[in-house]
Structures are given as structure tokens and as C-alpha cells.
Image: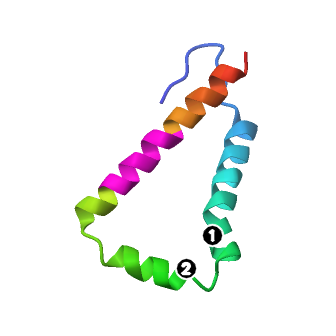
Amino acid sequence: MRLEKGMRFDWSFFICALGLAIVLEGLPYFLWAEKMPKVLLTLATHRPKTLRNLGITAIILGVLIVFLGRSLRG
């Protein structure tokens, strides 16, 4: 992707966002370590279509949260 002249990619913001995503991914394993194997086995029994629907729902929710956060910046 080529950026327009004068635009710069904010690596600091990107790395912070990536770090936050990894923290959020790790929280359930830390907080509910005993329950996570059962949760993962339950997810493994779902049909791929159900998992895709769950995934697209999470993606849409995440994008909406990003837009909300960006709009609050002013």
C-alpha cells in the first residue's frame, strides 16, 4: 500500500494496538485457565459456518469500536 505524499504510517500506534490485541487474547487463558480447555473443545465441535459467523461478528464489532474510538479523538 502506497501512502499519499506527506502521510506517514504511525508505527508506534500500530505496535501499541497490536500489543493490546495480544493482551486481550491472553486474558481468558490467564483468568480462566481451568475452563479454557473445555471452551476450546466446545468450539471445536461447532460447524465451520458457525465459527465464521462468530468471527465476522467479532470483526465487525472490532471495526465499530475502532471507528468509535477514532471519532472520540476530536
Magenta span dominant secondary structure: helix
Give the residue at x 38% y 73%.
43
Is residue 69 shown in magenta?
no
* Circles 2, 1 touching at the beta carbon (< 8 Å): yes
- Residue drawn at x 59%, y 34% is 66
The answer for how far apart the CA atoms under marks 2 and 1 are is 7 Å
Residue drawn at (60%, 13%) of the image? 5
Residue 3 or residue 56, whichever sits in front: 56
The C terminus lies in quadrant: top right
Q: Count neighbours of disc 2 (C-alpha within 10 A) and say few if under 14, some if 14 to 19, many if 20 or more.
A: some
- Side (left or right) of 18 relative to 38: right
Magenta stretch encompasses residue 55: yes
The x and y percentages for residue 2 are 50, 25
Viewer-proximal residue, 11 or 71?
Answer: 71
Under circle 1, the secondary element is helix
Residue at 70% over, 75% down: 30
Q: What stretch of residues is rendered in magenta?
A: 53-62
Depicted 20 relative to depicted 11: above or below:
below
Q: Amino acid at mark 2?
A: Met
Q: Position of residue 16 (x, y in %)?
A: 73, 45
Vertical placement of 12 versus 43: above or below?
above
x and y percentages locating residue 23 in the rendered image: 69, 60
Mark number, residue 28? 1
- Left or right: 8 with respect to 38? right
Q: Earlier in the sequence, mark 2 or mark 1?
A: 1
From the top left corner, tell me how far across and down residue 19 is, in percent. Answer: 70, 53
Tag 2 residue: 36
Q: What's the residue type where badge 1 is placed?
A: Pro
- Mark 2 lies on a secondary structure that is helix
